[in-house]
Image (cartoon, rainbow, N blue to C red):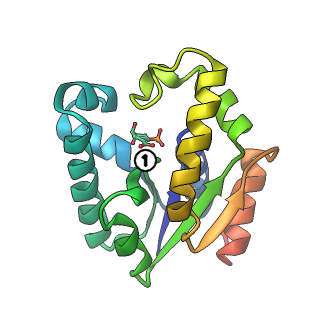
Amino acid sequence: MKIVLIGYMGVGKSTIGKLLADELNIEFKDLDEIISHKENSNISEIFNKKGELYFRKKESQYLKAEIENQKENILSLGGGTPCYGNNLDILLNQKNIKTIYLRAQINTLCERLFNEKSSRPLISHLENKEELTEFIGKHLFERNQFYLKADNTVVVDGKSTEEIVNEIIEILNLKQR
Ligand code: S3P
């Protein structure tokens, strides 16, 4: 089985994905890292030099390649991945894929993202927490319709990474090997 983690920027998809993979002793993959590696460029550079449309095309292309390989692993997606093209339908239509939406409140996301915004092209121009909060609020409202189609939702606010990992293991009925 592939476990695919989706959710807004800053929710902890990569952190939780790595810990979950360690716990289950399976491979961890991060779609943004795959894109950076294949394109030989970091995500901000891709956005700046080639534009968001190019990024979305590559994101979809590498997602499909990852799904086709049928390998058992944990895959964390970019915050926008399920919201473009037919990416989400493809994920939901595979029997061997379980999608998990890591969900956080706007304030939690704002606190986490404020100091990391320079590496995220969609929010790097926002100047203060008020602007960031407003942006996240609107963006999350648009994106929740996609995220909420995931097989399961795990709320992360106020929980330790360990608690979140254990919750996912319980939900998916997985046992440590
Ligand atoms: C994006 C989220 C980013 C990255 C790109 C676009 C988005 O991934 O894919 O900057 O559209 O939300 P993270 O969610 O890992 O920050």
Residue 93 locus on image (x, y percent): 39, 81
Name the residue beneath numbered marker 1: 78
On screen, residue 51 above or below 118: below
Mark count: 1
Ligand 1 neighbours mark 1 (CB distance < 8 Å): yes
- Observer-nearest of 56 and 141: 141
The amino acid beneath tag 1 is: Gly
* Residue 84 at x, y percent in the picture: 34, 57
Q: Quadrant of residue 46?
A: top left
Q: Is residue 40 left or right of residue 84?
A: left
Q: Residue furthest top?
A: 127
Q: State whether residue 123 is above or below residue 146.
A: above
Q: Identify which residue is drawn at 36% across, 43% down.
A: 32
Identity of the residue drawn at 51% across and 24% down: 117
Q: Name the outermost residue toward the right.
A: 158
Identify the residue shown where x is 53% and y is 41%.
9
Can residue 177 be seen here? The reply is no
**Residue at the image position 61 percent from the left and 49 percent from the top:** 16
Q: Which quadrant would residue 115 be assigned to in this image? A: top right
SS at circle 1: loop
**Residue 155 visible to the viewer:** yes
Task: Check the picture and name the quadrant holding the C terminus.
Answer: bottom right
The one nearer the camera, 108 or 33, is 108
| Residue extending farthest bottom | 95
Tell me which image quadrant ligand 1 sits in: top left
Percent x, y for residue 2? 45, 70
